[in-house]
Amino acid sequence: MTPLVEQLKGGLDAPICLTWELTYACNLSCVHCLSSSGRRDPRELSTAEAIAVLDELRRLQVFYINIGGGEPMLRRDFFPLVDHAVANGIGVKFSTNGTYLDATAARRLAAMDYLDVQISLDGLDARTNDAVRGAGSHAAARRAMDHLAAADFGPFKISIVVTRHNVDQLDDLKALADGYGAQLRVTRLRPSGRGADSWSELHPTNEQQRQIYGWLLDHGDSVLTGDSFFHLNALGEPLPGLNMCGAGRVVCLIDPIGDVYACPFVIHDQFRAGSVRDAGGFTAVWRDSDLFHDLRQPQSAGACASCGSWDACQGGCMAAKFFTGLPLDGPDPECVKGHGEGLLVGVGRGADRLGTVPRPAMDHSRPGAAVPQPVLFTRR
Amino acid sequence: MLDRRLALHPQVALRREPFGALAYHYGNRKLIFLKHPDLVRVVEALPEHDTVADALEATGIAESRWPSFVAGLESLERAGMVTA
Amino acid sequence: MDANVIDAGPESSADEPDELVEEELLVEEISIDGMCGVY
């Protein structure tokens, strides 16, 4: 029998799960926001359109969706949409900064079936976290966690984007999660959205990548990663997970205006497969789009062919390569063997050796919000 | 295992695929790949038979293959996907 | 054409038992979080 991963690389008739960004509106302005969120897009899917998408996903037997944004709780129909999903056999995990997860919301969520909550946090303390996510964001996240605990929600997830500044806090963050009976999730920073501008200062150093790899090996059975560190598998024993890029093969993104991208980290025309508003809806995009057909073809090692690690690392992450201006058929910018580093030297603002660095498709950032802004505790 | 009566857990959804099937347990969030269409047919036949052996026989699985299927069903039971 | 080449047609039931008796793993669990490209 063909190894499972090889079959999955060829794509399935429907995603196994997918990310759905409900809105580009957000009360925060995190420096590394993968969707450059802040301002609501006037073209957002209506409630009726969103319900229709959910019904389509139910027909496709998509088991699980990961709702995010922006801040998904800023959609006025947030609870009706989540209710509709779980009532129709679609498991939901939603990702939130926690600002609007008050005691009432926590109790409502605790009463729901098939629902997971993921609170975003990027540092153990306000000093580390708020430098990336904005003043007050750490407090808001902790408050949301306390509300979930008080409402007996059960295990929720705390999701950390690993940066140069929080690598040394992983043990303490694990302890924080353990204290709540929550599950820690650590994911890779990609240079996507606003992340492109902060990536060079925030991404882990080579030494820190080894530290992360070792830590994940030690905690593999209890910490989630979203399979986002498979580029580190060139360091040795593979980390838990499929260890393959799922974009366009087993997962994809539906964005707030109904565009379908290969994944949330490549919101750019080059990785746009179509729209749920096209005739044929999401199903036709998933099954028939040129982009997804291309991604489901066997990928060649390209420039990595002579390196013995390609089978382990798969050449890393498309988004990481794309948004640092590197060719897709070559090494990841964070290639653990250093093959990407040398290529990066010639790429950047003004440098022309490898061409210009692509910019995100859209920018919904709030004007003047290039740096974290104080959290506004207003009702939506 | 061969003498036991089993069936898919009511909270499990089975989605057929060219390679076999995906099984997702809404209760414990487990996702399992059934990697051969024959195993899928056996799992679907379980509720109609008194024993696993009967189901294997009814679906035409050669006895030389039964150990692999028993191991597969044991994995599914450990994951909560099939129950008595 | 080499007369000894065996036509690689669809898997026949005569071939399957040998493959599967060799402790083939029929079931594999993957975390729902174990797919890259998701929040």
Image (cartoon, coloured by chain):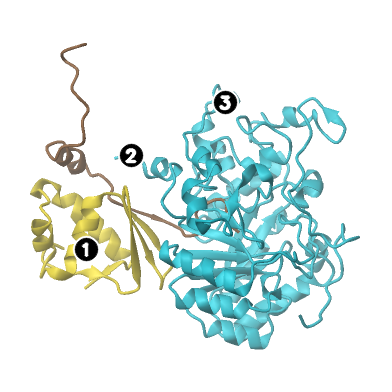
Q: Secondary structure at mark 2?
A: loop
How crowded is the residue under tag 1: few (<14 C-alpha within 10 Å), some, or many (20+)? some
Q: Is residue A136 left or right of residue A279?
A: right
Vertical side of B7 occupied by C28: above or below = above
Q: Position of residue A68 (x, y in %)?
A: 64, 65
* Chain of the residue on which disc 1 is drawn: B
Q: Is residue B59 left or right of residue A69?
A: left
Vertical side of A162 occupied by A53: above or below = below
Instruction: Quadrant for residue A368, please give it.
Output: bottom right
Q: Position of residue B67 (x, y in %)?
A: 16, 51
Which residue is found at the position 48% from the left and 75% from the top? A86
Q: Earlier in the sequence, mark 3 or mark 2?
A: 2
Look at label 2 and name its amino acid.
Thr
Say which of A171 and A7 sits in front.
A7
**What is the CA distance from the residue labelled 1 to the residue labelled 3?**
44 Å
Q: Which residue is mark 3?
A: A302
**What is the CA distance from the residue labelled 1 to the residue labelled 2?**
23 Å
- The numbered dot on residue A300 is none
Q: Quadrant of the N terminus of chain A?
A: top left
Q: Position of residue C12 (x, y in %)?
A: 15, 37
Look at label 3 and name its amino acid.
Gly
* Chain of the residue on which disc 2 is drawn: A
Say which of A278 and A322 sits in front.
A278
Q: Which residue is mark 2?
A: A2
* Colour assignment, chain B: yellow
- The numbered dot on residue B44 is 1
Look at label 1 and name its amino acid.
Glu
**What is the CA distance from the residue labelled 3 to the residue labelled 2?**
23 Å
Q: Which chain is cyan?
A: A
* Colour assignment, chain C: brown
